[in-house]
Image (cartoon, helix red, strand yellow):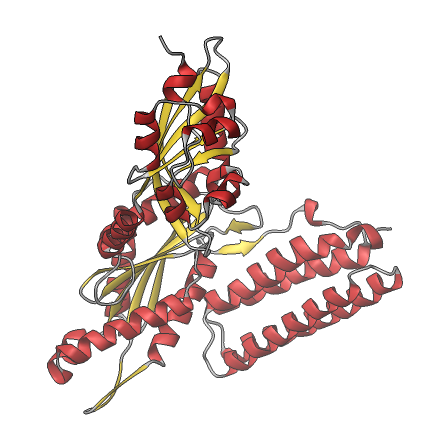
């Protein structure tokens, strides 16, 4: 009875080499003619691979599949042309077979074609051992499934991409949105869900026709995608209803984003033979933390806010606050208003900086309270002016302090100060024109100035100015 070397060993080459040539190349690769013929002339890629991944033998079909000649492949290991993301998995399976954890494996993987393209293959791999159980070589069969994978990708695209606008379908939106809410719930991240509806869309269809109505839908979808971040989930629920899940976004930032969407859409125009079509949207939003409610429930909350926006005259944003856990930077008043709350842990140890930071909290809360109480405009303008002056002076004092101690990133930090002052100046100018909402102002103070700058960037120079 012939041993395993005779029955299964290969190395037959892509060109159908003779037995004596094969044996001369490697004594363990002598075999019977039937197996030699099946290997050499198989319609699928076949190879023999050493335990370290070195190709020992390859057939013509494999060479054609990956674009390399026999000599080129035999000078490489399979890892050399395997897609980098698939290498670790392939090596893991090899090791599991070598250690008797599995006998064979079947797996899809990707090769890198010589021309740089991706080749998808379905692999069937087994191991040949000698009579002493010593690993000799792997037998690998590679079936080209590139066309199949492309077809699958196209089917997935058709199922997940709205045919008209190119954004996520309702089903895809729910799949992605539910996943993100579950993930955000685990990490106690703030999130905001938006419902976006075109105002008087039926009138647009009746006046200009459904073809123009489709152009409006496409324009809306494009504007939203360009206005949202790549990490946000956006989709069309049906008709003229769209929705978005904003990740790591609380009420203040959510309102800002919704307002930006509303304004960008209001400024969008669709040109037709009958004239330019302009349109607006109403947006309802709900901000929350935790995964206590499903995406469907969150959309119902956002839809209730959307209904309020429609009743308020359309082209409006309404936000519901359903935040379960507030960040420690904020606290609630008895009326439910979220104010900035100072904590001892924010102190730097430098008396001047700490006193000015406390004043910043005080100025900000006084201004926000005045806005919410609808104090006269001149009162609010005075508070904004005082706050702006305080921020500018504070930044000048900080600059002098960290430059005196030669803080390494002094120039970078000063540039941040300049951008924040410019941002405050723009907000002030817009406030004079009645173009700034309380939410937007609160977002600038709480997020840009307090959270991102004072509680993150400022801490980097605290060790240099303590004392």
Q: Quadrant of the N terminus?
A: top left
Task: Say if residue 303 shows up in the picture.
Answer: yes
Give the residue displayed 41% in from the left and 44% down from the top.
Answer: 110
**Residue 271 shown left or right of residue 86 in the figure:** left
* Residue 346 image position (x, y, % from top left): 69, 49
**Residue 246 shown left or right of residue 328 in the figure:** left
Instruction: Give the image quarter of residue 424.
Output: bottom right
Q: Relative to the observer, which residue lies in front, 458 or 146?
A: 146
Q: Which residue in the rendered view is the most extreme toward the bottom?
A: 274
Q: How many marks?
A: 0
Q: Relative to the observer, which residue lies in front, 8 or 421?
A: 8
* Residue 293 image position (x, y, % from top left): 31, 42
Give the residue displayed 46% in from the left and 80% down from the top.
Answer: 434
Instruction: Give the image quarter of residue 234.
Output: bottom left
* Residue 324 image position (x, y, % from top left): 42, 43
Task: Say if residue 142 shows up in the picture.
Answer: no
Give the residue displayed 83% in from the left and 67% down from the top.
Answer: 400
* Residue 242 image position (x, y, % from top left): 27, 62
26, above or below 286, in the image = above
204, above or below 102, in the image = below
Instruction: Give the image quarter of residue 263.
Output: bottom left
């Amino acid at each position: 009875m012939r041993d395993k070397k005779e029955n299964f060993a290969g190395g037959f080459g892509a060109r159908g080499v003779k037995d004596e040539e094969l044996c001369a190349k490697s004594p363990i690769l002598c075999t019977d003619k039937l197996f030699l013929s099946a290997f050499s002339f198989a319609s699928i890629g076949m190879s023999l691979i050493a335990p370290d991944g070195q190709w020992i033998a390859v057939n013509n079909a494999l060479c054609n599949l990956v674009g390399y000649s026999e000599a080129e492949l035999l000078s490489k290991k399979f890892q050399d042309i395997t897609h980098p993301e698939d290498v670790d998995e392939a090596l893991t399976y090899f090791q599991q077979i070598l250690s008797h954890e599995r006998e064979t494996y079947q797996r899809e993987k990707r090769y890198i074609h010589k021309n740089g393209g991706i080749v998808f293959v379905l692999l069937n791999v087994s191991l040949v051992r000698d009579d002493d159980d010593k690993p000799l070589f792997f037998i690998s069969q590679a079936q080209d499934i590139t066309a199949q994978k492309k077809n699958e990708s196209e089917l997935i695209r058709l199922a997940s991409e709205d045919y008209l606008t190119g954004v996520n379908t309702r089903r895809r939106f729910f799949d992605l949105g539910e996943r993100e809410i579950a993930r955000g719930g685990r990490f106690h991240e703030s999130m905001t869900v938006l419902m976006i509806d075109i105002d008087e869309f039926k009138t647009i269809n009746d006046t200009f026709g459904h073809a123009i109505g489709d152009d409006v839908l496409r324009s809306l979808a494009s504007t939203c995608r360009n206005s949202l971040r790549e990490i946000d989930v956006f989709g069309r629920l049906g008709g003229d209803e769209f929705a978005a899940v904003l990740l790591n976004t609380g009420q203040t930032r959510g309102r800002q984003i919704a307002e930006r969407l509303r304004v960008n859409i209001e400024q969008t125009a669709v040109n037709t033979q009958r004239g330019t079509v302009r349109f607006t949207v109403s947006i309802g939003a709900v901000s929350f933390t935790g995964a206590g409610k499903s995406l469907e429930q969150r959309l119902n909350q956002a839809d209730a806010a959307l209904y309020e926006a429609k009743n308020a005259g359309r082209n409006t944003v309404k936000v519901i606050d359903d935040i379960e856990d507030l960040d420690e930077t904020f606290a609630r008043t008895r009326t439910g208003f979220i104010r900035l709350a100072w904590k001892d842990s924010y102190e730097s140890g430098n008396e001047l900086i700490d006193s000015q930071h406390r004043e910043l909290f005080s100025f900000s809360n006084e201004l926000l309270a005045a806005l919410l109480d609808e104090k006269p405009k001149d009162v609010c303008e005075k508070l904004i002016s005082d706050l702006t002056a305080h921020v500018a002076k504070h930044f000048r004092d900080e600059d002098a302090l960290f430059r005196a101690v030669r803080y390494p990133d002094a120039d970078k930090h000063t540039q941040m100060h300049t951008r924040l002052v410019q941002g405050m100046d723009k907000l002030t100018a817009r406030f004079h024109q009645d173009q700034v909402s309380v939410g937007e102002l609160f977002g600038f103070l709480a997020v840009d100035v307090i959270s991102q700058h004072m509680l993150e960037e400022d801490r980097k120079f605290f060790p240099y100015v303590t004392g």
